[in-house]
Amino acid sequence: MSRTRIHNLSVSLDGFAAGEGQALDTPMGHAGTRLHEWMFATRFGASIMGRKGGTDDAFAQQHEPGIGAEIMGAGKFGPPGWQDDAGWKGWWGSNPPFHTPTFVLTHKPRPPIEMAGGTTFHFLDASPAEALAVAREAAAGRDVRVGGGPTVARDFIAAGLVDHIHLVQVPIVLGRGVRLWDGLEALEAGYDIEAVSTPTGVTHLTFTRP
Amino acid sequence: MSRTRIHNLSVSLDGFAAGEGQALDTPMGHAGTRLHEWMFATRFGASIMGRKGGTDDAFAQQHEPGIGAEIMGAGKFGPPGWQDDAGWKGWWGSNPPFHTPTFVLTHKPRPPIEMAGGTTFHFLDASPAEALAVAREAAAGRDVRVGGGPTVARDFIAAGLVDHIHLVQVPIVLGRGVRLWDGLEALEAGYDIEAVSTPTGVTHLTFTRP
């Protein structure tokens, strides 16, 4: 059965999944790299600087297997205003790391863009449930990943659409930014939850529908 | 050196250390017992129903050793309005579980009350720093515990007065209640932090001043 999954969603102790003041040169706002250092250090994050295996890497690698489509928010696809740049094709160069149909939620859709390596960007002005139905069809039996940002992840979780959530709690207090948990009271009622701390100080939390 | 410590402070994933709607018959508000079930199940919590050892118990037991005085908020000492009941001596019967001088912060102080077993309740209308100075003196070289509730714990942490904090993150989303983290941005900068998850699903976080 095709599931809907979220992976590697970092959150601070006080529940912020991105900082305040996101912009082109500060995509995570005042959080900087602090929410994602655990991942950059892994083999999974090796394109940046990492090479560690271990538990953090094992969790991070789960991002890939079995995924047949990704859904992302407009804020992940580009900096504010990318909709007005007809040549913008995402942050990732000619061969983006998705390798599947990838659905970008935006109020200003444009025609699909076929990239190298199997990624085709599709642009949808749709509700979470509508977008998921389209992505599910495209995934052809494999799973759909909700790739973020945090607001999109929260919207899909709040709509009851997500079967598996992998959160990474980072031991920092951000104080401000994008709150992950708003509107998710009693989320635990619908999931089996497991927690695994690692020597880097982060705690991996998985929420899985029984 | 006498340190200031906080132990067994439970917090939800979304950062609430108590629920909404606290009253005499619902001291934790809508959270009920959910924030503290991990502790009730331990030997440390055995007066209620627990008998488990293991990691949760090992952490819970750290509440006691080396403590020479406790500071607590008015909301821990009694239900709203206890200040108007001249006979109120706390929730704990004739032999309270503190066994040290215990300082209750209240805007309506009263004379000390000496209980069995070494607990004497003192009532202070004082700032966190002032109360700590008095409690430190009474602790006679041993440590001072800030016993809560959550607002008092937060006030002492925010004032930079706490050397060791033991938090227990419980995998529930409370949605509303008393926020622990407000005003504590970048708390991690002043502490060494360790995280330990246990099979019950909670994660023990310790913050220790280097």
Image: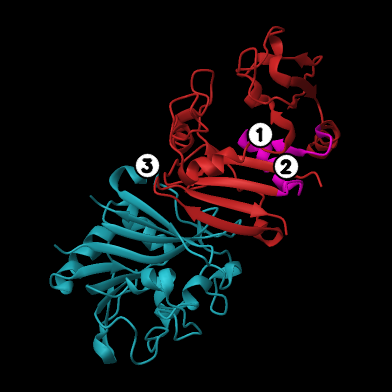
Chain colours: A red, B cyan
Residue A196, horizontal then vertical, whole percent: 50, 54
Q: Is residue B35 left or right of residue B105?
A: right
Give the SS element for disc 1.
loop
Identify the secondary structure beneath mark 3.
Answer: loop
Residue for point 70% across, 37% down: A145
Q: What's the chain of the residue with tag 1? A: A
Where is B152 relative to A198, above or below? Answer: below
User: What is the tally of numbered marks visible in this picture?
Assistant: 3
Q: Which residue is mark 3?
A: B186
Q: Which residues are magenta?
A: A139-163
Residue position marked by numbered label 1 in the rendering? A147
Task: Find out whether residue A142 is within the magenta segment.
Answer: yes
Most foreground residue, B192 or A155: B192
- Callouts 1 and 2 in the same chain: yes
Where does residue A40 sit, x and y in percent of width and height?
Answer: 46, 32
Q: Earlier in the sequence, mark 1 or mark 2?
A: 1
Residue A156 is tagged as: 2
Residue at the image position 44 percent from the left and 32 percent from the top: A51
Q: Amino acid at mark 1?
A: Gly
Callout 1 environment at 10 Å: few (<14), some (14 to 19), or many (20+)? many
Q: Quick check: can you spot residue B34?
A: yes
| Chain bearing mark 2 | A
What distance separates the C-alpha of mark 1 from that of mark 2?
Answer: 11 Å
Query: As displayed, is residue A4 above or below residue B175?
Result: above
